[in-house]
């Protein structure tokens, strides 16, 4: 008997694999409770949700697009994809991260407080990141920034010492390059 | 399911037939070929009960508790291959049904569960007998619906049957508010109802993967078929195909608890059940095989034991209709998505076409090895002249019923494992047990459902004294509908499997596992209006079993068995297939299971 023996037979054999982030685009029927089905699936099976976005994308076809960023070993990610696909309300599932043509974007609203030199510094960095100022007064800015999640992380990191006070992010959206559709 | 032809003709003549929601429910059941349903009325479902009152083509079986309705519907479905139908009211009616719904999900049983709901304008107000039925059942159904408009109801009803019965079968809940039951709208039959969802399960296997699997099996020196409930669900044809493929390839066959009966227990290629209480030969063959063909089985933890030591040297072919099952627990070298029956037929066709003609003697060493494992005679037990051994009771029950048209249900625990080990199933659809969820109280109501479907057959619930008390009230249902079910209780006065684990793993501290204050089962039978029988010695057992079989009424049989008998063989928790214990090792089992094993269930 060793202390590092797995606590459960259920996780034996998969413990050593590394975890990766993955983004799934899920096209679902837009009907009451459909988001709960997806979120409930993740909760019931112990999967993480790093970010989640959902909105109706085609009114005539009554479909919504859900974009989920999750984390797991390749084995778990394959399971997540299969479980999502299995839902009766699901039309299509795509692992965007695995797709070389996948594009991921996120929008963030970032509030920074500061006066004097800090204001100039914040404006200058915002220009470099192509962030737009959408509101300002004598002691704060609100920046609007669009880009890959890593770009937003970086901008937030730079704003922190200057006077970052609040961040609101949409979570990741994704789409595929070219003329193909989900 | 076939549509009712006369009704289809009616619909053609009168395309826009206007019915109330309640009438639509009843009509859709008839159109879907339903003849029997199990239920319990209540305020929120009264309009449907009113419509039932006017429908002579449907037989409604009134249960005594909604859990009984779901298990009865499961037994009905499992023994016929048709979906089971349940009708219950809102609130407690729905929540009581949840156990059976989860049970059906875990064991892939097609159920249609119709629940009443408070009127739509009261939803969300904490109304009397309101509960969030679709919220509660979302994670324990294959799909569920809350019907907000009566115009959606016909499509939902027909799609529910399609979803429940195709792909990997499962339970579907339809929650219908009372005002929707009263509202009127146009009814459409199954043929004309447009589906709501884009649901198309794949049933045909990929031919390239089938060829790959065929080549693997032909090249194997130590092949094994590991079959599960999916073969039963795929219909009688799948069981026949499994028998043919096993014969063609010469490979041995084992099965999960849920798959018993797909392959005949009397066939020389049968190894017995696999898993925690499987046979020595089946588990060792699984461990040592070089090619494993898993068909409609899901590598449950009760089957695999310790995963990192599970069949370490084998290539695994996994055939399953559920894509999320393939590779979920154990990596598949060849994963074939499809219906078990169709894939088996494709494998047989590929085998015959390719004519691999492998060396006929290639499997000789494998069979020789299997013979040495069989020689351990792992199901041997110490007989007694004075006390009825539970294993002996099942052996005698089998011997005295094997030539009859018998169906067996069980509760959950030691008696269930003994039934699986000692009752030798030759045909599919004859064995109804709660495998995945392990629901004590399943067997008695399941027997009610089986007997409704097969009124002339011999239906026996092999029960334990603890389990049977969980749904005992359904005896009253059996009396009401004149269902001559036989409740064969292996009465050891303990929650036997709990006691066994406490003895082996918890220092013989028997915490709350003794069945104190047991009822007198003979008198209890009489109180219900059934027949009570009791056997206490091996000498009287046969006569009493014969008497039970010959009694044309419901029987509760109190079979007093050895109290401290344990269920062996056993793979201790956290151990591999080749580390299983036989009865003679029982003394030191406590020292065999390590700390990690104790933490497992």
Image (cartoon, coloured by chain):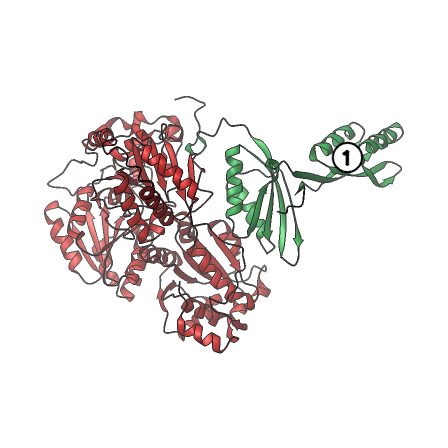
Chain colours: A green, B red
Q: Is residue B434 visible?
A: no
In the rendered structure, the answer to whether residue B139 lies left or right of residue B404 reads right
Residue B332 spot, x, y in % from top left: 42, 35
In front of the other: B305 or B283: B283
Residue B370 spot, x, y in % from top left: 23, 32
Q: Secondary structure at mark 1?
A: strand
- Quadrant in which the C terminus of chain B is drawn: top left
Residue B313 spot, x, y in % from top left: 36, 27
In front of the other: B222 or B568: B222
Residue B459 spot, x, y in % from top left: 24, 56
Q: Residue at 38% x, 32% y: name it.
A: B315
In the rendered structure, the answer to whether residue B299 lies left or right of residue B246 reads right
Q: Which residue is mark 1?
A: A165
- Quadrant in which the N terminus of chain B is drawn: bottom left
Chain hosting mark 1:
A
Extreme-bottom residue of the structure: B13
Extreme-top residue of the structure: A2
Q: Is residue B144 visible?
A: yes
Q: State whether residue B492 is above or below residue B449.
A: above
Q: Quadrant of residue B380?
A: top left
* Count of marks, rendered view: 1
How busy is the neighbourhood of tag 1: few (under 14 within 10 Å), some, or many (20 plus)? few
In the rendered structure, the answer to whether residue B367 lies left or right of residue B66 reads left
In front of the other: A13 or B587: A13
């Amino acid at each position: 008997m060793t202390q590092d023996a797995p606590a459960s037979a259920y996780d034996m054999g998969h413990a050593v694999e590394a975890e990766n982030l993955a983004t799934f685009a899920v096209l679902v029927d837009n009907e009451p409770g459909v988001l709960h089905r997806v979120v409930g699936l993740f909760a019931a099976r112990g999967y993480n949700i790093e970010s989640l976005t959902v909105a109706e994308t085609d009114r005539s076809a009554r479909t919504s697009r859900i974009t989920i960023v999750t984390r797991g070993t390749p084995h778990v990610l394959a399971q997540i994809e299969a479980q999502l696909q299995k839902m009766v309300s699901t039309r299509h599932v795509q692992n965007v991260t695995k797709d070389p043509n996948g594009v991921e974007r996120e929008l963030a609203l970032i509030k920074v407080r500061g006066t004097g030199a800090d204001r100039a510094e914040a404006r200058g960095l915002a220009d470099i990141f192509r962030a737009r100022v959408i509101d300002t007064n004598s002691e704060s800015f609100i920046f609007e920034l669009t880009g890959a999640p890593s770009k937003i992380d970086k901008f937030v990191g730079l704003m922190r010492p200057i006077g970052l006070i609040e961040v609101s992010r949409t979570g990741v959206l994704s789409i595929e390059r070219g003329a193909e559709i989900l | 399911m076939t549509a009712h032809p006369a009704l289809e003709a009616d619909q053609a003549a009168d395309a826009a037939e206007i019915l109330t929601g309640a009438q639509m429910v009843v009509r859709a059941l008839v159109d879907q070929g339903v003849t029997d349903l199990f239920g319990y009325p209540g305020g929120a479902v009264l309009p449907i009960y009113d419509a039932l009152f006017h429908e002579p083509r449907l037989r409604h079986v009134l249960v005594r508790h909604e859990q009984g309705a779901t298990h009865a519907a499961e037994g009905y479905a499992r023994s016929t291959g048709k979906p089971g139908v349940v009708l219950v009211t809102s609130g407690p009616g729905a929540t009581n049904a949840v156990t059976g719904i989860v049970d059906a999900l875990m064991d892939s049983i097609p159920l249609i569960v119709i629940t009443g709901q408070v009127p739509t304008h009261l939803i969300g107000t904490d109304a009397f007998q309101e509960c969030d039925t679709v919220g509660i059942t979302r994670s324990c159904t294959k799909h569920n619906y809350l019907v907000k408009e009566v115009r959606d109801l016909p499509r939902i009803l027909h799609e529910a049957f399609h979803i429940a019965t195709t792909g990997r079968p499962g339970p579907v809940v339809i929650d219908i508010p009372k005002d929707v039951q009263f509202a009127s709208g146009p009814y459409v039959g199954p043929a004309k109802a447009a589906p709501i969802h884009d649901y198309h399960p794949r049933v045909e296997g990929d031919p390239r993967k089938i060829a790959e699997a065929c080549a693997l099996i032909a090249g194997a020196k130590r092949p094994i078929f590991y079959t599960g409930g999916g073969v039963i669900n795929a219909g009688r044809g799948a069981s026949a195909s499994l028998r043919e493929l096993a014969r063609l390839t010469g490979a041995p066959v084992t099965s999960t608890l849920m798959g018993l009966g797909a392959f005949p227990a009397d066939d020389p290629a049968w190894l017995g059940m696999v898993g925690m209480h499987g046979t020595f030969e089946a588990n060792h063959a699984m461990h040592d095989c070089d090619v494993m063909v898993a068909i409609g089985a899901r590598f449950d933890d009760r089957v695999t034991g310790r995963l990192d030591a599970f069949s370490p040297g084998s290539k695994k072919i996994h055939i399953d209709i559920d894509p999320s099952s393939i590779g979920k627990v154990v990596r598949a070298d060849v994963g074939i998505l499809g219906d078990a029956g169709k894939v088996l037929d494709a494998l047989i066709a590929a085998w015959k076409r390719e004519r691999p003609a492998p060396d006929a003697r290639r499997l000789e060493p494998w069979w020789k090895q299997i013979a040495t494992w069989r020689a351990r005679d792992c199901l041997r037990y110490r007989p007694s002249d004075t006390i009825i051994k539970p294993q002996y009771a099942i052996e005698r029950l089998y011997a005295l019923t094997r030539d009859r048209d018998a169906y067996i249900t069980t509760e959950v625990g030691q008696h269930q494992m003994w039934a699986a080990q000692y009752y030798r199933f030759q045909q599919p659809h004859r064995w109804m047990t709660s495998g995945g969820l392990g629901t004590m109280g399943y067997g008695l109501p399941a027997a009610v459902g089986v007997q409704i479907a097969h009124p002339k057959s011999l239906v026996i619930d092999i029960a334990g004294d603890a389990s049977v008390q969980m749904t005992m009230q359904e005896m009253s249902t059996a009396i009401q509908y004149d269902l001559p079910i036989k409740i064969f209780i292996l009465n050891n006065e303990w929650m036997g499997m709990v006691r066994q684990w406490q003895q082996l793993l918890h220092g013989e501290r028997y915490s709350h596992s003794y069945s104190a204050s047991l009822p007198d089962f003979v008198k209890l039978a009489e109180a219900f209006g059934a027949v009570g029988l009791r056997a206490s010695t091996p000498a009287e057992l046969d006569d009493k079993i014969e008497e039970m079989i010959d009694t044309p009424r419901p029987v509760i049989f109190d079979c007093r068995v050895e109290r401290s008998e344990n269920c062996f063989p056993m793979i201790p928790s956290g151990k591999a297939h080749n580390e299983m214990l036989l009865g003679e090792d029982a003394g030191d089992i406590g020292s065999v299971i390590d700390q990690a094993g104790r933490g497992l269930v």
